Amino acid sequence: MTHSLPVSGSLRNRLVVILIGGAAILAFLLFFAVRNYATQVAQQGQDNILGASVASILDAATIRDGEVEIDIPYASFSMLSTPFDDRVFYAIYQDDTFLSGYPELAVADRADRFQTVTFRGEAVRMITAERILIGIDQRTRIRVALAQTQDALSGTLEQISRNAAILGGGFFALAALLSYWATSTTIGQLQRLTDSVTKRGPQDLSPFKKPVPAEMAPLVTSLNSLMGRLDQSLSQSEDFIAEAAHRVRTPLATVRSYAEATLQRVDKKENRQAMRSMVRAIDESSRAAGQLLDHAMITFRADHLEREEIDLVDLVHDLVLRLTPIAEMKDLELRLQSDAPVAYAGDPILIQNAVRNLIDNALKYAPNESAVDIVVTAAPNVQIKVCDSGPGFPSEEVDTLTTRFKRGRNAEGTIGSGLGLTIAIDVAKAHGGDLVLSNRKEGGACAALLLSS
Amino acid sequence: MRSIIAFILIVLPQLILAQEWEDQQLFNADAPAQPLRIISSTDTSLFAPIIADFVAQNADISVEYLVTGTADIDQIFRANPEAFDLVISSAMDLQLKLANDGLAQRLPDVTHPSWAQWRQSLFAFTSEPAAIVINRQAFAGQAIPRTRQELIEAMRAAPETFRGRVGTYDIRQSGLGYLFATQDARASETYWRLMEVLGALDVRLYCCSGDMIDDLASGDIVVAYNVLGSYATARVESRDRLEIVLPSDFPTTMMRTAMVSIEAPQPSPATAFIRHLIALQSRTDTDVFQLPPLNTQSNDIERATIALEPALMTFLDTLKRRRFLAEWENAVIQK
């Protein structure tokens, strides 16, 4: 009965892709932002030290006897020590004359500026600073260029990049977990609704009353209204069938009594034969009408099941007594087997109706001068089993018979037996049980009405 | 024919570098390959066992060991870095500047503690304190001075005993002497007072530790200031006339360093030699290594070792050096 619906995309996948994709983009942004910021900070750190160092060198410049002396403090280069042992280069100029250091290291034109230049094949960070010295009768400009390789900086950056990558990765993993959880929770609401729709019995068309998230409320409201209309239209058609059956039964009874009366008066053999067929057909129709009525009644009672304490043996015994005259007309014997009273809480009218339909079926298929066995047991299950010695169920259908006759499908096959089994199934289901069909080894069919407490 | 070519290959560089060496020795001369050229300031007598041990393990390598002063090493090597495989010197500042100027190869695979190497290119393998070496006879009947201050007082008390009989490095010639002097001057003003006292006593100036200890041993001088303890120890074992004093007021300890030339003709045997040196200095089960090994004890505060850092270049600055030498000459050479 499951129709495969055309599926287009998946909400879960879409959510997961959006959330995880977003997290990945954010993680990348985070990684680059952290690394960028760290680069700036690390570069700032190196620049600060270079600045302090060059300031201390300039500070040591003096004019003595008209000659420039620069007594570079030991700390000026000491503070440039790094864990990666970066190389240090410097050059000191007086005005435009080279004084000491590395002559190839050209000072920048503008002082107090940091540059990254290539010196001796390596990228170095360089600062140029200057100071005006004023002597007794002279004024001179001292310029110092100080450069340092960037091994420690790149080492630090590598480490920071690694940490930033771990941070970004961790963020991504966390976000992915979170998005998986969020998706599951969201989809879970839909799943829960699906479950509660699936779990419902075939008769249950009552509206959903459990609270649902606001976004799902319109869907559930529509579903409820659809089911309300369905319920209404179903009960309308059941009412209609019951009404029609009822309307047909009374005229049928009239027609039957006329046919009986006519049969008494007809002498010609073929005419009597025709009249008898007519009476049989009328009986069949009236039985079908009765079953339709029963079915309508059972559908109603099953929907509003009211349980009362009854003794099943007692109930079946009454039924057997009532049906015995009909059985005797076919020279059949009804044998009831039961040991002790079987107490059960159920609807007596429904159970009686189901068992009567089962016995009716048995009487219909049992050969003349045989017996129909009715067994009522309490253990292991509460069950009422009716067996005949007729031809039995068609073997290929014995497993599917109980599922075949469902609402709307009972128009197929013989109307009588079909409805009878349907009634029995509905009663069993209403009591939380089932109808089990089987064939006896020695021949004949068995129908067991299982009831659960 | 082949041997002639080999001969030319070996001799030619030596002809080009017509250099006067203090000492020059070829180890494992039978080895077929071109020799590993080591330029060093360490006396051959101290280094020969180490090289012998190395060639014993590497039979196919021959080693040419060339000795000259620390300042000369700097000049000769800077002029021809492609002529040498290894540079070994006690002048840490000159060595560090060579490495800073990119004349040393980086050997990332050599593992050595960070305080004992610089930039994976300069590797320290000894810890040698600067010592005051004293001829005991000059101090007969009085206490041997233990600090610079005590030495100053002893010399002031008897100037005639010491006049012309005290020696120290000529820091204008010796790289190591200059390193010790600058580090002393950094540490304390006592250094300048001592220099003034030495100057007043007509101090004799030496280029190298070896010569100073020779004169001490012969009795020409009675006090030598800032001599390498390791050289003195080598003599003290045979002559108990000398007393080695490690001044307790502030010690100055140097680390001898080795590096592979950036243009080394044979970089891989040179690297192997550095590894050999490093491994050998920490071994205690052999007397091949006669130099004091690296200080691994934590009493470094007491025996302050000069750190391998860019600050060593400070006193090599032209202006700074000019100024320092002027002050030194002013104190020592009193006219």
Image: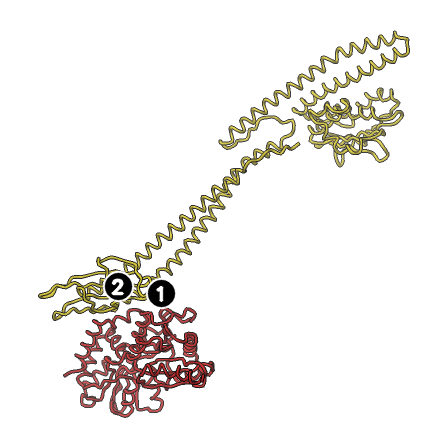
Chain colours: A yellow, B red
Q: Nearer the viewer, residue A370 or B59?
A: B59
Quarter where residue A50 is shown: bottom left
Where residue A377 appears, as percent x and y from the top left, is: 78, 33
Let me know if residue B114 appears in the view.
Answer: yes
Front residue of A243 and A329: A243
Spatial CA distance of label 2 from label 1 is 19 Å
| Element type at mark 2 | strand
The type of residue carrying mark 2 is Leu
Instruction: Give whichever of A197, B37 is nearer the camera.
Output: B37
- The chain that hosts pointer 1 is A
Quadrant of the image containing the N terminus of chain B = bottom left
Q: How crowded is mark 1: few (under 14 residues within 10 Å), some or many (20 or more)?
A: some
Could you tell me the amino acid type at mark 1? Pro
| Spot occupied by residue A413 in the image (x, y as percentages of width and height) | 76, 24
Picture residue at 43% right of the left edge, 48% below the top: A27
| Numbered mark located on residue A83 in the image | 1
- Against A252, residue B32 (above or below) is below
Q: Which of marks 2 and 1 is in front?
A: 2
Q: State whether residue A326 is above or below residue A151.
A: above
Q: Tag 2, which chain? A: A
Q: In this view, does A206 lie above or below B201?
A: above
Labels 2 and 1 share a subunit: yes
Label 2 neighbour load within 10 Å: few <14, some 14-19, many 20+: many
- Circle 2 residue: A146
Q: In this view, does B78 lie to the left or right of A316?
A: left
